[in-house]
Image: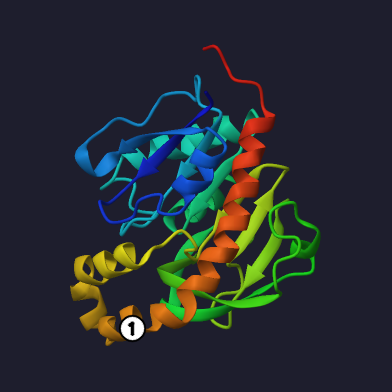
């Protein structure tokens, strides 16, 4: 059975619906929970792919969170070996960092439900082809990144020019969230209640609006994540 490493930075940001896509392809997920002090692998080893989830820290806070340095090293190895990589939110910022792009604080935090628009490149992308050109996604980020050199832009929003990108054949970064469930959204609203208050964002409205936008978002995510999982299946299983 193929296995992918999953780097998790906080209890409430799990694989969500990505787990369904992996399970459908017979791929197992081995979590590394850095918020519990678990060590990031020194090498990909038998991992056929790498998924890096979101989290409240910034990639520029490596002194405070030294595990981020090891994650970047693991990312660099995975991409060098052309193994499938998927970065979600903070994960996408780490992928961008590993590719030499700058990650900085955005003009304003993007939290809640906002439209994203796919680029022309996305129409021919193996993960995104056939997806409607604009849809409302779930966001929770304050940092943004420039498009990494050599990467292809896949999506943008009104506030954030680079919302998604692909590097090479198999490495993807998505700043927005498609993996979320109602439970994950509710837990994030509770976990980050102080941040919501500081930003004057109504968490209850975020939860209520999930009924309007989540079903379609999950449908898109199901297709995209299944296609990413299929990339893992195309690679031979390492015996290391």
What residue is at 65 percent from the left and 40 percent from the top? 230
Q: Secondary structure at mark 1?
A: helix
**11 on left or right of 69:** left
Which residue position is annotated with label 1? 208
Above or below, 2 against 121 in this view is above
**154 on left or right of 61:** right
- Residue 97 percent location from the top left of the image: 52, 50
- Residue 38 percent location from the top left of the image: 26, 33
- Residue 124 percent location from the top left of the image: 81, 59
Whether residue 145 is visible here, answered yes or no, is no
- Residue 193 percent location from the top left of the image: 20, 74
Q: Nearer the viewer, residue 104 or 77?
A: 77
What residue is at 58 percent from the left and 83 percent from the top? 158
Q: Nearer the viewer, residue 215 or 159?
A: 215
What residue is at 20 percent from the left and 39 percent from the top? 36
- Count of marks overlaid on the render: 1
């Amino acid at each position: 059975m193929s296995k992918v490493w999953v780097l998790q930075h906080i209890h409430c940001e799990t694989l969500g619906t990505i787990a369904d896509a992996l399970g459908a392809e017979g791929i197992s997920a081995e979590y590394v929970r850095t918020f519990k002090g678990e060590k990031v692998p020194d090498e990909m080893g038998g991992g056929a792919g790498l998924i890096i989830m979101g989290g409240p820290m910034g990639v520029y806070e490596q002194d405070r969170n030294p595990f981020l340095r090891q994650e970047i090293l693991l990312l660099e190895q995975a991409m060098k070996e052309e193994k499938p990589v998927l970065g979600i939110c903070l994960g996408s910022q780490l992928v961008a960092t590993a590719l030499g792009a700058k990650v900085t604080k955005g003009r304003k935090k993007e939290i809640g439900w906002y439209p994203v628009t796919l680029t022309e490149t996305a129409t021919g992308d193996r993960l995104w082809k056939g997806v409607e050109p604009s849809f409302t996604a779930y966001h929770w980020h304050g940092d943004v990144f420039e498009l990494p050199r050599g990467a292809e832009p896949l999506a943008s929003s009104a506030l954030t020019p680079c919302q998604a990108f692909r590097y090479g054949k198999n490495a993807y970064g998505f700043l927005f969230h498609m993996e979320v469930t109602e439970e994950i959204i509710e837990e994030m609203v509770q976990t980050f209640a102080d941040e919501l208050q500081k930003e004057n964002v109504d968490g209850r409205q975020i939860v209520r609006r999930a009924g309007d936008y989540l079903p379609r978002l999950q449908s898109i995510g199901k297709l995209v994540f299944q296609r990413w999982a299929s990339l893992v299946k195309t690679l031979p299983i390492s015996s290391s």
